[in-house]
Image: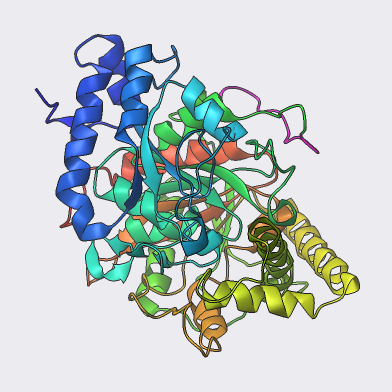
């Protein structure tokens, strides 16, 4: 019989029930599959279903890990041997991985039952999940809006309670953006905290890092304990944590120096409900005994221009490797116009342009390091506008000039922390009058995920979100 109370538990709670033998991994998997069948036709979050893979895992016997028996989704950018990984691209719709990514292997070692892949925009390039291959992923809070990107499938699936935790990755905001848009918790770890091998040493020039989206703070912390640490090929390592991350949740954060802004990094006006929500959270933090002041880091360079160059260069390499694989030039029948345009624009750049972008990222990083000498935490809106309406970012359009202005308005503040490598989290602390989630972003110094988990745990207690469910909910 299916375990009907599934949606009331986070991943740690489900794993505890499995340990107590109150429920079996098979029952949990059956319930996750049933929830997918009931809800996914509405939101389109689980785009690759390999239930047989998870069934074989359970039949063989799951490893004894911290989350043994919990159903799980891998983002459709990472490799799991014997299963399809499409990267949201038509050309790769039938590609089957012949090995595991290091992070996928660590998820397996944690005892998770991986029953499918969550939707991503093509090659993870956009902050909305609307690939030509699979179509749009819809926000469970309002089906006309995006659940964010590039981990939009994970955000929608967790928000809709198909499962309590799912893999996500963040190269310019792709954990925090769907966390904000979908009303769930998302921590972008410190650079190199979690592995990205074995096929590469770093993603997007060191900007990208993988982790999860979750219902609860403790799920994120327990998962980080399970998967963090270098691999033999790691180019560099993150600072060692003082104690297990799971021990930080519920620990007193102390009296923190918190700086905040309710403005865009560019000085542009932002959505007034979001600005008001930031000020409300600043007031809440002051009431908790933290020292709060309005203060924002200066920008030493333009994050958007830097991202365009770094991501464009990486996209050009992706296209080149695919062309080598198929033995011909790619066309818009193979990949979306945005992918081709990004690659083609990059080809026009020189090696010096790429190095200049790396230098600009370093200048932004250095400016942030100086700024954080005066505070422990920086609070800002994760997104400067409510979740996008589906279709606002059309990556298949002949004219792509609409994209840059939308990105500047929507997500101007996330990528700087990818450049600096600092940890940053989006916490679901506000909703607008239309019922859409508005995430609050908190960043800390390099290696200070523990501090963020302590603060997140405190906020989870005083302003809980777990029982707030979207209309489209399993």
- 31 or 434, nearer to the observer: 31
**Magenta span has 344?**
no
Of 307 and 246, nearer the camera is: 307
Q: Where 242 sits versus 359, above or below?
A: above
Rendered view: 133 above or below 247? below
Q: Residue at x 32, y 53 (%)?
A: 45
Quarter that holds the C terminus: top left
The residue positioned farthest toward the top in the image shown: 20
Quadrant of the drawing holding the N terminus: top left
Q: Is residue 453 visible?
A: yes
In the image: residue 311, left or right of residue 170: right
Say which residue appears at 33% left-offset and 74% top-offset: 390
Q: Nearer the viewer, residue 409 or 294?
A: 409
Q: Specify whether residue 474 is in view.
A: no
Q: Position of residue 46 (x, y in %)?
A: 32, 49
> How is the model colour-coded?
rainbow
Q: Main secondary structure of the magenta part?
A: loop
Q: Quadrant of residue 418?
A: bottom right
Rendered image quadrant of residue 296:
bottom right
| Position in image of residue 409 (x %, y %) | 50, 80
Is residue 243 covered in magenta? yes
Q: Is residue 470 left or right of residue 244?
A: left
Comparing 391 with 93, the one in front is 93
- Residue at horizontal 51 percent and vertical 67 percent from the top: 126
Where is 400 relative to 411, above or below?
below
Side of 30 relative to 248 (left or right): left
- Furthest residue to the left? 1
Q: Residue furthest right?
A: 352
What is the x, y in percent for residue 17? 25, 17
What is the span of residues highlighted in magenta in the rendered image?
234-245
Where residue 61 sits: x, y (%)? 37, 12
């Amino acid at each position: 019989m299916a375990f009907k109370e599934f949606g009331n538990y986070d991943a740690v709670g489900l794993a505890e029930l499995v340990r107590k033998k109150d429920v079996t991994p098979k029952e949990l998997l059956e319930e996750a599959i049933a929830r997918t069948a009931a809800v996914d036709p509405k939101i389109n979050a689980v785009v690759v279903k390999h239930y047989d893979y998870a069934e074989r895992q359970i039949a063989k016997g799951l490893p004894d890990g911290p989350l043994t028996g919990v159903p799980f989704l891998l983002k459709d950018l990472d490799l799991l041997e014997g299963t399809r990984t499409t990267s949201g691209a038509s050309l790769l719709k039938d590609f089957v991985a012949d090995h595991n990514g290091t992070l996928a292997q660590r998820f397996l070692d944690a005892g998770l039952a991986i029953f499918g892949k969550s939707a991503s925009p093509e090659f993870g390039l956009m902050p909305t999940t609307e690939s030509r291959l699979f179509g749009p992923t819809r926000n469970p809070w309002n089906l006309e809006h995006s659940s964010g990107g590039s981990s939009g499938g994970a955000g929608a699936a967790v928000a809709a309670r198909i499962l309590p935790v799912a893999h996500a990755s963040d190269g310019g905001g792709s954990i925090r953006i769907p966390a904000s848009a979908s009303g769930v918790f998302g921590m972008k770890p410190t650079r190199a905290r979690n592995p990205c091998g074995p096929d590469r040493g770093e993603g997007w020039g060191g900007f990208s890092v993988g982790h999860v989206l979750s219902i609860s703070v403790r799920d994120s912390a327990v998962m980080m304990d399970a998967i963090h640490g270098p691999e033999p090929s790691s180019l560099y390592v993150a600072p060692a944590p003082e104690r297990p991350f799971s021990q930080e949740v519920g620990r007193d954060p102390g009296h923190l120096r918190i700086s905040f802004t309710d403005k865009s990094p560019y000085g542009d006006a932002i959505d007034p409900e979001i600005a008001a929500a930031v000020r409300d959270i600043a007031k809440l933090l002051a009431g908790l005994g933290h020292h709060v002041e309005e203060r924002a880091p200066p920008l030493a360079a333009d994050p958007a221009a830097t991202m365009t160059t770094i991501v464009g260069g990486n996209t050009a390499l992706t296209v080149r490797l695919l062309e080598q694989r198929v033995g011909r030039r790619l066309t818009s029948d193979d990949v979306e116009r945005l992918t081709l345009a990004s690659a083609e624009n990059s080809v026009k750049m020189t090696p010096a342009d790429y190095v200049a972008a790396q230098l600009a990222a370093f200048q932004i990083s250095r400016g942030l390091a100086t700024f954080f000498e005066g505070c422990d935490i920086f609070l800002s809106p994760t997104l400067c506008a409510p979740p996008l309406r589906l279709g606002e970012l059309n990556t298949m359009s002949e004219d792509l000039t609409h994209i840059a202005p939308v990105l500047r308005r929507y997500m101007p503040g996330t990528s700087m922390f990818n450049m600096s490598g600092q940890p940053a989290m989006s916490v679901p602390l506000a909703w607008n009058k239309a019922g859409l989630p508005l995430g609050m972003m908190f960043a800390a110094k390099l290696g200070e995920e523990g501090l963020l988990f302590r603060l997140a745990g405190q906020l989870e207690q005083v302003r809980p979100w777990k029982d707030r469910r979207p209309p489209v909910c399993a």
